[in-house]
Amino acid sequence: MSDSDVDSAWRAFADADARVGAPDRIRHAVMAAWDGPREVRGAVRSRHRDVVRAALAVAATMAITVAWFHFRDSHAPVRDADVAVSRSARPPSVGADDEPDRVATVAHPEPVRSSPRVVRRAPRVLRDVISAETPLTGGSAPLVALTGERALAAEPLQLVRVRVPRTSLRAFGVALIDPDASGLVDVDLVVGSDGLPRDIRRVRPVVDVRDQSMESP
Amino acid sequence: MPGSGAADGAADVELLHRAATGDKDAFGVVFERYQHVVYRFARAMTGSSDAAEDITQEVFVVLIRDLRRYTPERATLSTYLYGIARNLSRHRLRRERRLLACLSGLSCVSESYAADPFDGMADAEARDDVRRVLGGLPVRYREVVILCDLHELSYADVAAILRISIGAVRSRLHRARQLLRQRLTRSAASTRRPLARSSVRWSV
């Protein structure tokens, strides 16, 4: 292969490129943007920003939900007799196939004391928390569609990992086998450009280190 | 290159000033003057006509938005527009790496073949080879070879667009041409066909 062959190929490419013109529809769109900058600019701007905003809105909503559940749990009176930490009594919960977490359940119901001691739960110390910057890996479970409609192929989607209480999974239509199951769970949501979740999958339960330390002295 | 001369530059400033006061016709002239170069640049960078349309559209929407913020003392309008198109192209390439897969399927179907159909086919194949190899170059080499060799901008203009020194432009261009030549030769050798029309005649 000689240099002249390469040069002539490049010239052919450059000549063809020089003849390329922008389609007229670009002019129409840009001039429409001039006429109505706000409306059209919104339509032609990068869809990426919309998706990011939608994802942030969903994440903020989830964070508020989680915070509210934490607040409610930490202020609710708890009777000592009703709560016993059990490793063996592991109630079946949503997709509980290999959960390493512990769940507070009623192991041995006892008569309620006449003056139950009201205790406040200490704030949960959650470790092994997945940082928001880490790549979303580890979700081997299949995605479950949340809507009856099939997602459009061209729709921009965003995968968002959120940490929610188990009980809030009901809002996504997930049937909880044990309605009293507590604790947090990481789920992946596929969020559409309108901010609504399309699919969901469970990633892993969140291990409550406080409970772990209470159990193993 | 449009807009690189002093007269054109002055006209651009005047047109933009009028556009900033709401003169749609003035903006239309600016658009007509630069839309093709922006589109060609985006198309060569991304390898996709659809992406190039989006980027061209977005470049001028950004210009509409920032008409009052553009300062001609910092850069000519063409440099400014190239810079926006470059940023958008790089952003798009990062976001949608799958666009690279479109490179092989992109062809100029509107072109008619030459009198000799074999010559036309050979030219089309050669162009596709070049397009594919160009799209496979690292972005920092691709953009410099597009600006210098396809758009025939000066080193100074390319340095201003890429915000690097002229020496860096020279070295990148040298390396880009080397890579392009090596890969074109390798590509033609792997397909066992000549690159250009003249070679077709020899091989038949």
Image (cartoon, rainbow, N blue to C red):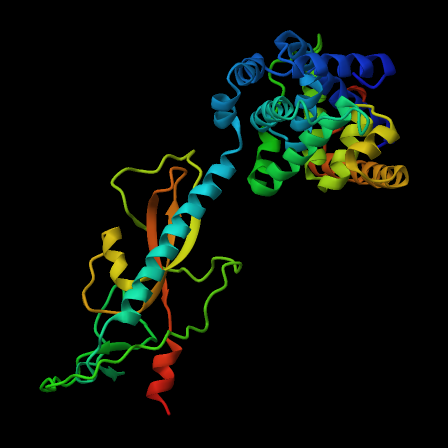
Q: Nearer the viewer, residue B27 or A10?
A: B27
Q: Nearer the viewer, residue A160 or B44?
A: A160
Q: Residue at x 54, y 13 (%)?
A: A28
Q: Position of residue B87 (x, y in %)?
A: 67, 35
Q: Position of residue A9 (x, y in %)?
A: 78, 25
Q: Residue at x 80, y 27 (%)?
A: B75
Q: Residue at x 67, y 19 (%)?
A: B121
Q: Looking at the image, can residue A79 be seen?
A: yes
Which quadrant of the view contains residue B29?
Answer: top right
Q: Residue at x 57, y 41 (%)?
A: B95
Q: Position of residue B24 (x, y in %)?
A: 61, 10
Question: Is A93 rendered above or below residue B98?
Answer: below
Q: Position of residue A124 (x, y in %)?
A: 37, 74
Instruction: Answer left or right for B88 relative to B141.
Output: left
Q: Nearer the viewer, residue B192 or A79?
A: A79
Instruction: Answer left or right for B5 relative to A98.
Output: right
Quarter of the figure with the C terminus of chain A: bottom left
Q: Residue furthest front?
A: A115
Q: Nearer the viewer, residue B53 or A54?
A: A54
Question: Is B44 rendered above or below residue B167?
Answer: above
